[in-house]
Image (cartoon, rainbow, N blue to C red):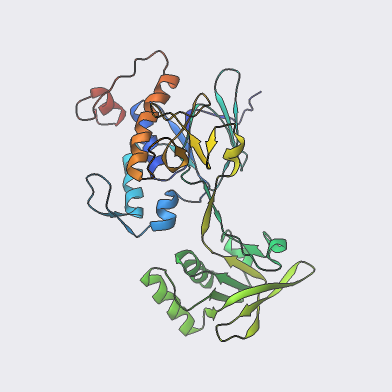
Amino acid sequence: MVSATTIHTDAVIVGAGPVGLFQAFQLGLQDIRSHIIDALPHVGGQCVELYADKPIYDIPGIPVCTGRELVAQLQTQIKPFAPTFHLNQEVTEVEQLDNGHLSVRTSTGLHFVCKVLVIAAGVGAFQARKLSVEGAAELEGTHVHYRLGDASRFAGQDVVVMGGEDSAVATALKLTLEAQPPKSVTLMHRRDVFTAEPMLLQAMRDAVASGKLQLQIGQPTALLSTAHQLHALQVATPEGQTIERTAQHVLAFLGLSPKLGPITTWGLAIERKQLVVNTETFATDVPGIFAVGDINTYPGKKKLILCGFHEATLAAFGAAAIVHPTRKTLLQYTTTSTELHRLLGLA
């Protein structure tokens, strides 16, 4: 029985990276509307997480662009088809229904019923690398956090932000600017070398110089707590000393690692942590489910964005045969087709 809150849609796309975004475009050209789900709190997948500001040289017609620029262009390209994004959540359950449709549930309780599911999950859902020191696991969610969330909860308390990239530096600075700031904010990194943007780094150095932000160079070796209440971090400094730094909360930005996660329970053929597909439509062995991009495998597979775009195109034709079974799926060109111009909002 489907609940009243069920979202009915033609297609659900798992993954909001470049290939997932282009999949929404290609489905749109087949008059198929989609919802896109991603575990990250923002669009862009590993393209934004791993090389947001690094140059990409192998996108046809674009001599050079950054990962962030490519994602921005793709978001502009899919606007005519207005896919709905559901971020910061994972698909936890996929089930075939008696009528051939698919039931899709997420970690936040959303429920979809769709005709096709396209998995464009890259190398898996990106999850925060956990702080692997004594006492961290027991305090996760109460005193150890991997995302900022509501900053007001840290008001009047001692907070340590760990990490050396944009996310850590930006979070530490944001906390110092809160209307009701923490009692103290410390940015901690294993060495005094950061990989954040130059403007962020300058703002961080200025905040340290003015006393609004403290800087601690060193490695955490333990979290010290009493009755599950964090009170300090034990830190090993580069000079070989062990010190304690007062803290009631730790925000750890230690990077992200991909995990295949619940996909392994969906009954799909898997080979070396990748989904097996046929190269005619990039369908999996489960009717109505397709896989494109780095998540799939087939003879001759190459993990390139360009290849993912090709796979998304053929997957859209495969999806059209399911979503519009009585229509003849024709090959049309965006340069001349009045029907594609209508779908793109150009007519």
- Picture quadrant of residue 89: top right
Q: Is residue 81 visible?
A: no
Which residue is at the front of the view, 343 or 45?
Answer: 45
When the figure is inspected, residue 152 is found, relative to residue 219, above or below; the finding is above
- Give the side of residue 69 with respect to residue 326, left or right: left
On the image, the x and y values in percent for residue 245 come to: 64, 80
**Residue situated furthest right in the rendering:** 227
Residue extending furthest toward the top = 326
Residue at x-position 62% and y-position 28%: 4
Image quadrant for the N terminus? top right
Q: Quadrant of the C terminus?
A: top left
Q: Does residue 211 show up?
A: yes
Residue at 32% in and 42% down? 306
Q: Nearer the viewer, residue 177 or 198?
A: 198
Which residue is pictured at 63% across the width and 25% down the height? 2
**How many numbered discs sit on the rendered protein?**
0
Residue 239: image location, x then y, percent:
56, 87
Q: Quadrant of residue 307?
A: top left
As drawn, is 305 to the left or to the right of 139? left
- The image position of residue 173, as x and y in percent, is 49, 71
Image location of residue 277, percent across then percent down: 46, 31
Residue lying at 38% horizontally and 26% vertically, measured from the top left = 280
Image quadrant assignment for residue 3 = top right
Q: Residue furthest left?
A: 336
Check the image and report above or below for 296 versus 29: below
